[in-house]
Amino acid sequence: MADPNVGRGGARLFNPSTECSVLSGAPFKAKNTLIGHPLFEPERLKRLLRTLPREHVEIRTVQSLGNNDGSYRRGELLTDADPVKTFEKLSEKPTWMLLHYTWVCDSEYAELMKQYIRDVTEKVGDVGDDISDLGCWIFLSSGRCVVHFHADPDQSFLNQIIGSKTVLVYPARILPESAVENLIYTNNQGAVTYQPEYERAMFPPIHLDPGESVFLPIYAPHRVINDDGISISLNVGFHTRTSRKRRTVHLVNLELRYLGLHPAPYNQRPLADAVKQWAHIAIRAKNKFFKSLRPHITV
């Protein structure tokens, strides 16, 4: 039986070039062996687009290098756009597509994600074996497009498969605590918005060619500029024991802030953070049985 950790041609799907850490809060590059993988061939992607529920296919207008106004806002959501036709016309009309829940709706992408994560846990020691909240998202976008500034509610590896791009990553510490809390609570990237002063804190730009990957630290905002040609990327996200503890503190802080209090930010008071781990159990019960008492956050 073939080794399930091994990708096409006997290669691991993920391989960092140097010793690296997901706890440092900084991005780093790695290698992937997804070039030419059959799951990312055009016809296979169109099959996926036909079977994914339409609500799982996010299609947005996107600014290009020719009309970028420097605001890095999310483009208009195109709810009536046909996914397959949009994909086929990416070279003609600047568009950004994000495919959600691929690992839920298609078993082949689920298996690919599992193989990838097994490689990550073997190659990156501080990930640990208590990994959870796995997901994989596919990005399909036009050449020369400027992808909006946003942050994700997890940490992830962005893998370039077709086309090339520059990824601009910022440290999570630049974001207001309330923005991080809203991002986690709503799972909506719109909770994080761009401010020009963030540029001073940006990490050095990272250029990705096909077969290259970048680690996006937990809650680290980022934006992307595509080179010429259509871009296809796979993002694999996850949580570790450490990041789950941090997420819990942020969720408790959101509840306290909703009550008009001013809680200490994450990692400022370790004893308070430990208490919040237990408080979260009661808060989850409250939100489950008394839904009217849940915070109402609009993004």
Image (tube, rainbow, N blue to C red):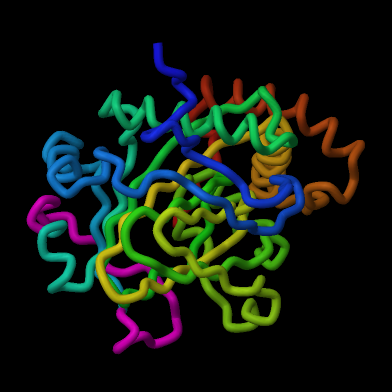
Question: Which sits in the foreground, 111 or 133?
Answer: 111
Magenta stretch, main secondary structure, is loop
Q: Position of residue 250 (x, y in %)?
A: 68, 44
Q: Is residue 135 left or right of residue 89?
A: right
Q: Quarter of the image for the C terminus: give it.
A: bottom left
Residue 124 higher or lower than 42, as above or below? above
Residue at image location 16% in from the left, 57% down from the top: 87
Residue at image location 40% in from the left, 10% down from the top: 1
Residue at image location 48% in from the left, 34% down from the top: 116
Q: Is residue 115 left or right of residue 57?
A: right
Residue 77 higher or lower than 1, as above or below? below
Q: Is residue 221 left or right of residue 38?
A: right
Q: Position of residue 172 (x, y in %)?
A: 67, 60
Question: Which sits in the foreground, 181 or 2?
Answer: 2
Q: Which residues, given as a range, are shown in magenta? A: 64-85
Q: Position of residue 2 (x, y in %)?
A: 41, 17
Question: Which sits in the foreground, 12 or 295?
Answer: 12
Residue at image location 45% in from the left, 60% down from the top: 190
Residue 227 higher or lower than 161, as above or below? below
- Residue 80 in the magenta stretch? The answer is yes
